[in-house]
Amino acid sequence: VIQVQFRGDDCYLSDVHQLVVNLDRTGPALVGARFEEGSHTNRRDANLLLTLFDADFVMLSGQALSSVGGAPANIGAWIPASQAVALRFSEGDGPKQVTAQARDAAGNLSEELSATIILDTAAPQNASVEINNGADYVPNPSVTLTFTAEGADFMQISNDSGFAGAVWEPYSP
């Protein structure tokens, strides 16, 4: 608490002015940063989910960003803190890393945290499947399948055209 009073040459005193100052030396806590979409996405738009405490502002940066909260000017700028921030990634597939930091009203900073997501906007190409080395007819229901696909990481197999009950499994050529 600070108190101030003024006096003129004529000895008249002003009212006492009191100012309460809050001393804040404890920074905000930024304890989590992850993408709502998970580890992979096929869209340039994503949501970064932040777990933060006592934060008034947040700054997001990274070469992979083309906008934060809908505005390119928000990249690397302090914006009001939020637990979910809409992002747009720069063009080009691959890993997209975003660094976050929080700040409180007193200017105290949190530690920086990073989150990475893989942007993959291209479907696998040149996919094919062969039954028994290309046979048109098979004598029994037990067959050998041969698969090829460029850019595929997973595949699913089913007798049902809607893939009911099928599970995604790793694909390796």
Image (cartoon, rainbow, N blue to C red):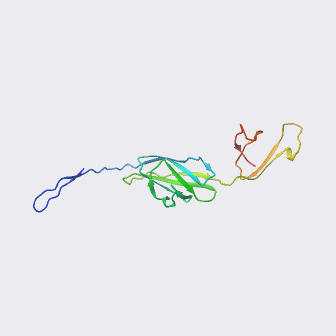
Question: For this rendering, which residue is in front, 112 or 18?
Answer: 18
5 vs 98, left or right, is left
Residue 147: give x, y in percent of width and height.
Answer: 78, 47
Position above or below: 130 against 96? above
Q: Quadrant of residue 66?
A: bottom right
**Measured from the top left, where is residue 161 in percent x and y?**
76, 41
- Please give left or right for residue 97 compared with residue 172 in the image: left
Count the numbered circles shown.
0
Q: Residue 41 vs residue 4: left or right? A: right
Kindly identify the residue that appears in the image at 86 percent across and 46 percent down: 133
Residue 158 place in picture, x, y as percent: 76, 40
Up the image or down, 12 lies above or below 136; here it is below
Q: Residue furthest bottom?
A: 9
Q: Nearer the viewer, residue 29 or 60?
A: 60
Query: Residue at 13% across / 61% down in the picture?
Result: 8
Counting from the top left corner in percent of width and height, residue 4 is at 20, 55
Q: Residue at point 54% right, 50% down?
A: 47
